[in-house]
Amino acid sequence: MTIHSLYIYDRHCNCVYYQDWNRSRRPKPAVEGGGILPGVSRAVAPTIGTAAGNCEASRDSFAPNSGVVIAVNDEHANGPDMQGAPQPGQTSTGLPFDEEAKLVYGVVLSLRNMARKLSGRENELFVNYRTSAYKLHVYETQSGYKFVMLGDPAGDSLRFILRQIYIGPFLEYVVRNPLMTMDSRERGIDNEYFRASIDRLVRGLSVFP
């Protein structure tokens, strides 16, 4: 079974984290001023200036005074954060990441509301839906964070993986991190320990190809 990508949204509808693994068609970098928070993912961050300038800007954005515990080294270009970078032979969806993130959230919100209205119960859970190309899985926390994962359309439910991410790396490196500002509306989750931990967790799963 293939796992394509992971999105995390806060209770303000902002995409605060993105990571992908097996996408053959990747989104274009976000448009500058498109509303994507800094730190969501360097792979889809708005492009500003030259490639070298972007590299330096990325390093500067993770300065110690940012109040976020991270790890940055000279091999960051090969790390899990760059899994979303286009590779030779891969095509683009033609859609900037900021638009893609909004569409994904819009689909989740619309289908969740539809499920509740059709069932007549406010606590009705929307957990996944499937198309011919992918299956979308959702796990929502009591605090309003939504974990969304796209996977193989023929695969089983991935909610258990999303829950593992929440009770494991998310609680450890985000919620319990005293230097991490939650609900700030200013930055995404740019904690490299968190990103690396998710990458290890997903790649270690028996369902990961």
Image: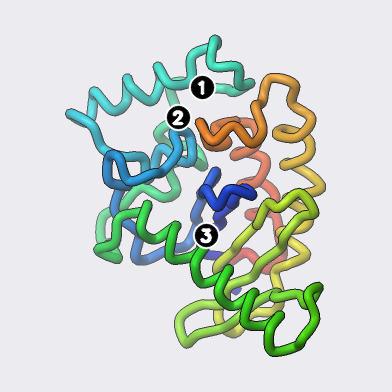
Residue that carries the numbered disc 3 in the rendered image: 5
Distance between the Cα atoms at labels 3 and 2? 19 Å
The answer, for residue 91, to whether it is visible in the render is: no
The answer to whether the residue labelled 1 contacts the one labelled 2, judged by CB atoms less than 8 Å apart, is: yes
Q: Which three-letter amino acid code belongs to the residue tagged 2?
A: His
State the residue at coordinates (70%, 50%).
201
**Left or right: residue 62 compared with residue 12:** left
Q: Secondary structure at mark 3?
A: strand
For the residue pair 203 and 98, the one nearer the viewer reads as: 98
- Dot 2, crowdedness within 10 Å: few (<14), some or many (≥20)? some
Residue 151 image offset from top left, x and y in percent: 56, 71
Residue 137: horizontal and vertical position, in percent? 64, 70
User: In this figure, which residue is indicated by the disc labeled 2?
Assistant: 76
Q: Amino acid at mark 1?
A: Val
> 57 or 4: which is nearer to us?
57
- State which mark lies toward you, 1 or 3: 3
- Residue visible at 51% across and 22% down? 72
Determine the residue located farthest toward the left in the rendered image: 50
Instruction: Tell me whether the residue at label 1 lies in contact with that at label 3, contact meaning CB atoms closer than 8 angstroms.
Output: no
Residue kind at label 3, given as amino acid type: Ser
